[in-house]
Amino acid sequence: MHAITGEQSSHSLLDLVQHFRQLRVLVIGEAMLDTYLEGDATRLCSEGPVPVVRKTAEYRIPGGAANTAANLAALDAEVMFLSIVGRDIAGSLLREALREREVSDAWLVEDSSTPTHHKLRILANGQYMVRFDEGEMQDVTNAPSAQQQLLARLEEIYPRCDLVLISDYCYGVVSEQLIERLQALHAAQPKVVLIDSKALHRFKTLPATIVTPNYQEACYFTSSQKRVHTGGNRSASSLDTPVDLEQVRVVAQQLLMQLATEQVAITLAERGVFLLNRRGEALHIPAHPVDHANDVGAGDSFASAMALALAAGGSAEEAAQIAIDAASIAVTKRWTAVVQHQELLQRVSLREYARHSASRESEQDSLARLAALLETQKRAGRKIVFTNGVFDILHAGHMQFLQQARALGDVLVVGINSDASTRRLKGKGRPINSERDRLALVAALDMVDHVVLFDEETPTQLIRLLRPDIHVKGGDYTYEALPEAEALREVGGRIVILPLAGSISTSSVIDRIAALSAQESAHSTGGKR
């Protein structure tokens, strides 16, 4: 099995995710409302043998393609959502839920003959009791006014977007006429197109960058094509049978033969993703194991992250890795999932750090390359700012301090004390978080450009190597009292002392946690001997 190579991206995975906020996405598909009613069931109803559920909470969440739109907005992209909603209560509630998640409802087509798709789930004591569905599959050709509005808005939006994501639940929004019009627009102005559909046969002639069926959907499509051409039959149960990767590859090859897509990404749930392109290059990327996974909406998170990563310039492999990270976050959440940009940045930062740690390059080589990069940036007139700390439990004081430090120059480098040096400085029991986690969290912050680990108690050696223009410290230090002051004089830099924000500190946070834990322990054991 050959690995996918293709054109290698010059960006790191972190760079790709940070680029999401510059992208404009057109989402086309079914707008749904997901409602969750939670409650406690403590007795049976006197009117019949059913539990009485006392409502404790209610959640209204965008579902279907609307969840894809919400995921894209949460990942900091600009979203234009093209769909149909009914002139009904569910439609109004869905519009409100979208606006709350910073997805404009301006491009939704409202049609009185088309009820809004609504899934109402009732849970008692955390267990599903029943799900009520409203709204049926609707042929848009039976609503000519809505169809014409969809096509007109597609013509208006398409030139403005960087990519198109089709989230097709086969309820009628993505009609044959819309596919034909999109194909014509794409021919005149090609863009990244990702297709996530339960009926891939409808997109046989639409040029796509990638399609993302799960294995069952892919098998259904390829087996249905066989039945059309040969009259053969295949039981539905065989589509759920565990398979090896060679079988998956055969299905992916059939998809490439029958669709006008450049690449196929078959999702395999907890087994990850299988990629295949038209050069015959294939790659299996495993997923992260997750206990008690909830997969409602995880596919939308996967498709959203993959589409954005491709549009940001990533390769299929890089996009799939980022998409798996997004899905692995989504499956840990309750209800219909949305992944935030900061969450994905942090997860990808951990991946990047682990990848660099796994490589055999020495720490000195890495630091030497950073020093060379910073020297180049200084020659270009950019001001280098350096600061350092343990950053054990990130809090508002850290955020304000780093924002102020970044405002002093053009590039912010943060030195992080290693676990060993932290123990020497702070004593036994510190740090709370490992150096790997602290590095990843600080690296994911928007205001930070580079992070480096150092094992000494002071950053003197780092300052001599990196030669910053400004060294920022927080607190009530004086220039003469700083052990690194001499190193700053040697490299021609200066020190800026920033006052700490209020009384908040990592130590005070830890003390409060310990005090609360002690109070809870005393409360739970009070009166017992």
Image (tube, helix red, strand yellow):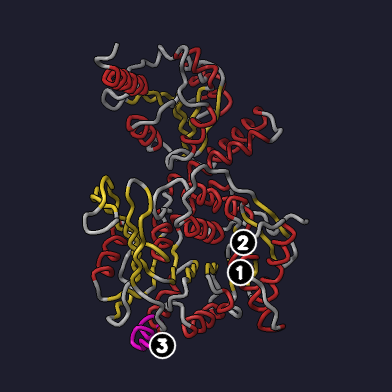
In the rendered structure, which disc, 1 or 3, sits on the residue that comes first in sequence? Answer: 3
Judged from the image, the secondary structure of the residue bearing numbered disc 1 is helix
Task: Please give the label number shown on residue 236.
Answer: 1
Task: Please give the label number shown on residue 81.
Answer: none
- Residue 211 in percent (x, y) is at 59, 67
- Residue at image position (64%, 68%) is 219
Cα distance in 3D space between marks 2 and 3: 34 Å
Note whether residue 54 is visible: yes
Residue 196 on the magenta span? no
In the rendered structure, which disc, 2 or 3, sits on the residue that comes first in sequence? Answer: 3
Judged from the image, the secondary structure of the residue bearing numbered disc 3 is helix
Callout 2 crowding tier (Cα within 10 Å): few <14, some 14–19, many ≥20: few
The residue at which mark 2 appears reads as 240
Note whether residue 107 is visible: no
Q: Is residue 196 left or right of residue 509?
A: right
Amino acid bearing label 1: Ala
Judged from the image, the secondary structure of the residue bearing numbered disc 2 is helix
- Residue 3 found in image quarter: bottom right
Query: What residue range appears in magenta?
Result: 141-151
Amino acid bearing label 3: Thr
Callout 1 crowding tier (Cα within 10 Å): few <14, some 14–19, many ≥20: few
Circles 2, 1 touching at the beta carbon (< 8 Å) = yes
- Residue at image position (58%, 26%) is 465
- Residue at image position (28%, 14%) is 528
Q: Is residue 88 left or right of residue 469?
A: left
- Residue 89 found in image quarter: bottom left
